[in-house]
Image (cartoon, helix red, strand yellow):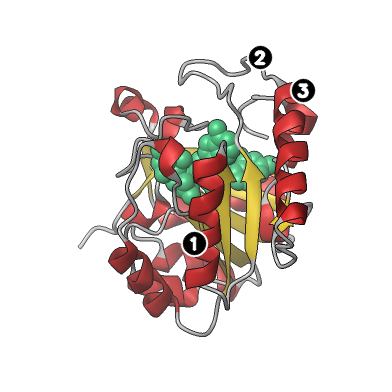
Amino acid sequence: MSEARIRVSEIFGPTIQGEGILIGLPTIFVRTGGCDYRCSWCDTLHAVDSDYRDQWQPMSVDEIWQEVMRLSGGKPLTISLSGGNPAIQLLGPLIARGHAEGYRFALETQGSLAKEWFAELDVLVLSPKPPSSGMATNWAAFDDCLRMAGERPQIALKIVIFDDLDYEYAREAATRYSHLPVYLQPGNHTPPPADAEDALVDIDGIVERMRWLVEKVGNDRWFEARVLPQLHVIIWGNRRGV
Ligand SMILES: C[S@@+](CC[C@H](N)C(=O)[O-])C[C@H]1O[C@@H](n2cnc3c(N)ncnc32)[C@H](O)[C@@H]1O
Ligand SMILES: Nc1nc2[nH]cc(C(=O)O)c2c(=O)[nH]1
Ligand code: SF4
Ligand SMILES: [Mg+2]
């Protein structure tokens, strides 16, 4: 039987993790192609829009691993599996391969699809989508993700905020999952179009939203929340592959 292949949009790094619980940590990204969502403000459309599917390469675990080894020089580090929705793919064998060589795996997903291999992860970042995305959250599917993950992975919520409604959504999610750390991320209202390698970004606008968010969290005495911008966007703007 031929080995299952993984649809890969891009593999890049080492860079630093720019978001959430692992922010600042040297990381290699394996970005898969395809998503069951289509958020209005998605900043990674080249891995979502099916018009770009001919750029998503079906790769074997061996091929992906060869590239990870080349980029990391064979020294173990954290690999972030992102997308698109990486939960669409069969990533268990890739995780097993990396673990055997001392690498760690984090997964970024919106929590719409639960997979058994979540239990093998080191870090699971669940990023449910607020109203401004135009997507509706299936909380039963989200609960399945937590169930599948079990005890091994560290789990965190990361919620993008554009406006008051998004903020209220985040408050409710944090109440529902009060045992999980929550990271609030100001939305980038100037995400790149799918065909742009490096589109202009309105950093001042993002920083303004960041200030608004910090103030709101303080006023509400929401002292468990962590508020973080997308560090890679501040450093490199909308550039791809960083
Ligand atoms: C591109 S997504 C890929 C993984 C998965 N589909 C998800 O949404 O969690 C990675 C992270 O980027 C966030 N993101 C996407 N577009 C954004 C934007 N315009 N501003 C801020 N964060 C954004 C998502 O919410 C998610 O937390
Ligand atoms: N540096 C960096 N950090 C990130 N954190 C989440 C990312 C993603 O697109 O999933 C991302 C990304 O694309 N680059
Ligand atoms: S779920 Fe993630 S990858 Fe999919 S459209 Fe939304 S932000 Fe983009
Ligand atoms: Mg990104």
Q: Residue at x 58, y 42 (%)?
A: 161
Cβ of mark 3 under 8 Å from ligand 1: the answer is no
Please name whichever residue, 113 or 26, is drawn nearer the observer in this view of the structure: 113
Q: Which residue is mark 3?
A: 204
| Residue 16 in view of the camera | no
Which element carries disc 3, helix, strand or loop?
A: helix
Q: x, y percentage for residue 62?
A: 46, 55
What residue would you read off at disc 1? 172
Label 1's element?
A: helix
Side of 37 relative to 1 (left or right):
right
Query: Which residue is at the front of the view, 84 or 226?
Result: 226
Disc 3 residue type? Asp
Q: Residue at the front extreme?
A: 219
Please identify, in this view, whether the residue under mark 3 or under mark 2 is nearer the observer.
3
Figure check: 196 above or below 239: above
Classed neighbour count for the residue bearing mark 2: other residues with Cα under 10 Å, few (<14), some (14–19), many (≥20): few
Is 26 situated above or below 117? above
Residue 197 in the image: state x and y as whole percent.
Answer: 58, 18
Residue type, label 2: Leu
Q: Which mark is residue 137?
A: none
Q: CA distance from mark 3 to mark 2?
A: 12 Å
Quarter assignment of residue 79: bottom right
Percent x, y for residue 172? 49, 62
Displayed quadrant of residue 230: top right
Residue 24: tell me if it is visible. yes
The number of callouts visible is: 3
Measure the C-alpha gap from mark 3 to mark 1: 28 Å
Find residue 78 and report its image quarter.
bottom right
Q: From the image, which quarter does the C terminus lie in?
A: top right
Q: Give the secondary structure at mark 2.
A: loop
